[in-house]
């Protein structure tokens, strides 16, 4: 079907480089591909692979300086758009070729209404009058599934949820019926259930308009879900190119094989599963009826009364020595609220949490200091959770300054080196600063810091969510190894299920502040009971094109 | 919006009352006005009579009670020096200052937005470098020196402009220009740095990907987002000007509020000092309310939060 058509977009030998100081770094090296009408081409790669830079170059929105085009052509309708004047190029942008982005809150102008921003395309390219442009914007919002479109067109980006904002973005991109849509990680920031709906919408829009869709993603599941063909990029080059079934069933390049092997949730459950029921001893941590309610501020601009938001409601669980408890839930489920209360970063409204039988919320003085030592945390964003002005040595040894009896000052260096080696880093990394490391390496440093006080519990709040899949699997492996060596207990928070599959003994599924389902990890995955757990599992993109096609048929979407 | 305004006005009134108390008692710490008004050789009886006539012999809190009572009936007292109601004198002076300040501020703001935006559009370019250096010079120039130099050049040597006084438009040129130089330089820098940040924002990329014209990207998409810090600084500068551009008013002989205040303080004309400060404070608080409202108009997120 595809081969009969002529391509609508041909990228030929495109190379992009960045100037950094005196050096020139190649970001994209000599990539070529064609895009045909009505097809989805996925560009798959990890961070730094050059996939987003290629898209920016095609769209003419490369950050320049420092980025610049080295060579290559981008042919659209027989014209090399890279050789066009700025004015000619501008007339194509948004009209023939459009783009949507990952971080919709940052990519929509905060001070103009969404209706205005959509209508702008009509005013700019078609010179439509304000009223007509606005009417069309409202119709587009309806098409992408925004309820009450007439009223909501006047709302501002921050008043929409992440999923709705992506719909707005799609409406804006599709305003002038472009032939090509480039989607740069459009669902990465979204919950899995929302992600599934946005992907369905994109496919529906592509089919209606016979549009060519370029889907840039790091997620093998998303690529399998939507793509017809896949380009795998690594280090600025295309390493593999093929139809989706071939890539997944029979990957040729070693990098593709490595990527496919790193997908979370493919491995086995933990072998030495903890049987909590057999534990006669008291649990390490017992959480009873933990509740946090927020009361909203009374608004000055509307007559709305104060409301109570139940961020977390009557949460109960036990955590035993050496056990890993996965807490899974989408944004707003209250999982981070639970963590923040247990780390004593916020006060609970009611309920208790006992660490070895003592209530942590009434602790003071020495016992509180001891609790801080025994419970350590690893956070989601390794860029924000390490102080950029402290060296790795300072970061890892800081806990010892506070808990001065753990390590003698003259032994700091040796112990830091030892910890760095435990987490798979090199001794001379101790003298460096966080910005010199990649995301995965920074997360290793954060883990080393958490280990410094030899805690019994480590709380991992989305500790692998910001990482590339191949790095993600390494960190999960590291966590498992450290747990087995040291008998650690983990509270492992995640927004989707696959990452907890290999690590957790038991899983708690949270929704809207409540626990909806709990059980042993294999039970949750094999025999989920609650509708929400089933929905979560079903919404997760599977990196297997055959299963995907089957599932999509069931959801009523044409392939 | 109405409630927001009401709350702001209420807060402003509290500050006003605090200021009132402070100024009243601080003014009385400067000494007895009679010592300045009456001839040095005047008799003790004359001095006594003056003090009693104006009630300066009562304890300060009784004087304050009287002041508040009169104030509530709209009476701000009488100038000892000019023998006229203090409020009348102040209300003659304030429009002069406000007109001067408003013209200077308006020109400075418009000019700064154009120059700052243009400079930020191509950072490191020729225009940017010229604008950055000259705005630094203008922000740090001492205004009394500029005023005097301008008088020497334009009035004495070239004889294009009058040296001082109040009259037709030609009298306005030098005072306004001298007054706007510093705020202009400062605002160019604020506009430039704010626009630099905004122009690298993600939504500017989105606008480019939509094919929006560059002019519209700078002046529609970016400028409104960049204005919040600019308005903050501009409001601050405007408040300082409303307080009386003392130096400019003195050098150019303008009968504005700044000059009036200095004269009254020097002469211990308490009623006028109090009235002048009260009226100026009212103007400044109004400017702050306007600044807050401008924030809310510019940015819907602020509307929601407050």
Image (cartoon, coloured by chain):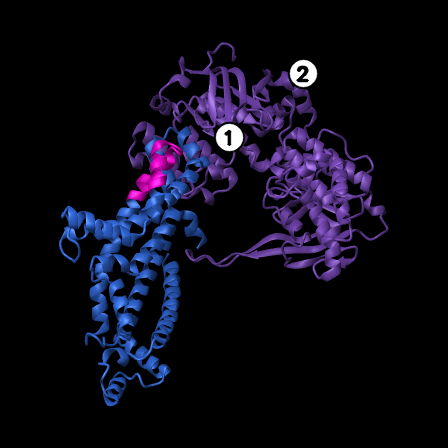
Chain colours: A purple, B blue
Residue A195's spot in the image, x, y percent?
56, 34
What residue is shown with label 2? A250
| Residue B76: quarter of image | bottom left
Residue A42 rendering spot, x and y as whole percentages? 55, 22
The quadrant the N terminus of chain B occupies is bottom left
Left-right relation of A505 to B283:
right
Viewer-closest of A116 and A426: A426
C-alpha span from label 2 to label 1: 29 Å
Residue A51 covered by magenta stretch: no
Question: Is residue A11 visible in the rendered structure shown here?
Answer: yes
Closer to us: mark 2 or mark 1?
2
At which x and y percent is residue B182?
A: 32, 49
Residue under the point 77% across and 49% down: A408
Q: Residue at x 79, y 57 (%)?
A: A357
Q: Nearer the viewer, residue A77 or B152?
A: B152
Q: Quadrant of residue B256?
A: bottom left
Tell me the magenta residue range.
B111-134
Regarding mark 1 in the picture, which secondary structure is present there? helix
Pointer 1: what residue? A201
């Amino acid at each position: 079907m595809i081969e009969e058509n002529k391509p609508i977009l041909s990228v030929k030998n495109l190379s992009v480089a960045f100037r950094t100081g005196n050096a020139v770094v190649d970001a994209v090296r000599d990539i070529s591909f064609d895009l045909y009408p009505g097809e989805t081409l996925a560009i798959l790669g990890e961070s730094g692979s050059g996939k987003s830079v290629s898209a920016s170059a095609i769209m003419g929105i490369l950050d320049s300086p420092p980025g610049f085009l080295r060579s290559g052509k981008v042919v659209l309708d027989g014209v090399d758009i890279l050789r066009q004047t700025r004015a000619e190029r501008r007339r194509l942008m948004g009209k023939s070729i459009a783009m949507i982005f990952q971080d919709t809150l940052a990519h929509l102008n905060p001070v103009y209404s969404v209706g205005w921003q959509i209508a702008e395309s009509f005013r700019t390219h078609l010179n439509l009058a304000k009223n007509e442009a606005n009417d069309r914007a409202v119709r587009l919002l309806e098409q992408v599934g925004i309820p009450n479109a007439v009223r909501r067109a006047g709302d501002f980006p921050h008043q929409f949820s992440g999923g709705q904002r992506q719909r707005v973005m799609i409406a804006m991109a599709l305003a002038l019926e472009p032939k090509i849509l480039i989607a740069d990680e459009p669902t990465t920031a979204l919950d899995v259930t929302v992600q599934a709906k946005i992907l369905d919408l994109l496919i529906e829009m592509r089919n209606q308009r016979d549009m060519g869709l370029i889907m840039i993603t790091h997620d093998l599941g998303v690529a399998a879900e939507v793509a017809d063909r896949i380009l795998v990029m690594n280090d600025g080059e295309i390493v593999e190119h093929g139809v989706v079934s071939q890539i997944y069933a029979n990957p040729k390049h070693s990098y593709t094989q490595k990527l496919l092997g790193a997908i979370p949730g493919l491995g086995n459950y933990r072998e030495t599963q903890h049987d909590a029921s057999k534990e006669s001893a008291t649990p390490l941590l017992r959480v009873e009826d933990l509740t946090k309610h927020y009361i909203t501020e009374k608004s000055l601009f509307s007559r709305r009364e104060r409301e109570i938001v139940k961020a977390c409601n009557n949460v109960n669980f036990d955590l035993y020595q050496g056990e890993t408890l996965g807490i899974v839930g989408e944004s707003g489920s209250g999982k981070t609220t639970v963590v923040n209360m247990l780390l004593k970063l916020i006060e609970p409204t009611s309920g208790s949490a006992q660490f070895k039988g003592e209530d942590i919320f009434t602790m003071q003085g020495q016992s509180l200091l001891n609790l801080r030592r025994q419970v350590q945390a690893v956070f989601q964003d390794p860029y924000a959770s390490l102080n950029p002005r402290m060296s790795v040595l300072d970061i890892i040894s800081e806990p010892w300054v506070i808990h001065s009896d753990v390590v003698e000052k003259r032994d700091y260096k040796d112990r830091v080196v030892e910890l760095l080696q435990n987490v798979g880093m090199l001794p001379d990394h101790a003298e460096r600063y966080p910005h010199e490391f990649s995301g995965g390496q920074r997360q290793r440093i954060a883990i080393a810091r958490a280990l410094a006080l030899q805690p019994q519990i480590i709380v991992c709040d989305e500790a692998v969510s910001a990482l590339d899949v191949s790095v993600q699997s390494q960190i999960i492996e590291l966590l498992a190894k450290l747990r087995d060596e040291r008998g650690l207990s983990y509270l492992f928070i995640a927004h989707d299920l696959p990452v907890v599959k290999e690590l957790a003994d038991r899983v708690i599924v949270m929704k809207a502040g409540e626990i909806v389902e709990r059980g042993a990890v294999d039970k949750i995955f094999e025999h989920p009971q609650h509708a929400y757990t089933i929905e979560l599992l079903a919404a997760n993109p599977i990196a297997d094109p055959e299963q995907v096609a089957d599932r999509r048929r069931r959801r009523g979407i044409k392939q | 919006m109405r409630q927001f305004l009401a709350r702001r006005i209420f807060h402003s009134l509290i500050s006003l009352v605090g200021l009132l108390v402070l100024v009243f008692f601080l003014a009385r710490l400067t000494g007895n006005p009679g010592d300045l008004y009456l001839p040095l050789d005047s008799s003790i009886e004359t001095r006594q009579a003056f003090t009693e006539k104006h009630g300066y012999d009562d304890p300060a809190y009784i004087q304050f009670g009287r002041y508040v009572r009169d104030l509530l009936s709209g009476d701000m007292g009488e100038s000892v020096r000019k023998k006229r109601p203090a409020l009348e004198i102040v209300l003659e002076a304030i429009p002069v200052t406000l007109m001067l300040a408003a013209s200077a501020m308006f020109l400075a703001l418009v000019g700064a937005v154009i120059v700052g935006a243009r400079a930020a559009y191509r950072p490191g370019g020729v225009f940017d470098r010229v604008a950055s250096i000259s705005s630094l010079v203008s922000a740090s120039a001492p205004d009394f020196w500029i005023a005097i130099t301008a008088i020497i050049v334009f009035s004495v040597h070239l004889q294009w402009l009058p040296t001082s006084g109040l009259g037709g438009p030609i009298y306005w040129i030098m005072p306004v220009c001298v007054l706007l130089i510093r705020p202009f330089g400062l605002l160019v820098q604020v506009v430039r740095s704010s626009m630099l940040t905004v122009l690298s924002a993600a939504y500017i990329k989105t606008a480019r990907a939509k094919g929006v014209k560059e002019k519209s990207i700078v002046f529609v998409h970016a400028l409104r987002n960049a204005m919040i810090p600019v308005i903050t600084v501009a409001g601050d500068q405007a408040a300082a000007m409303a307080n009386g551009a003392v130096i400019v008013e003195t050098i150019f002989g303008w009968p504005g509020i700044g000059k009036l205040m200095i004269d009254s303080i020097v002469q211990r004309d308490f009623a006028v000092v109090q009235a002048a400060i009260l009226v100026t404070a009212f103007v400044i608080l109004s400017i702050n309310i306007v600044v807050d409202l401008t924030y809310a108009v510019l940015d819907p997120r602020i509307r929601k939060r407050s």
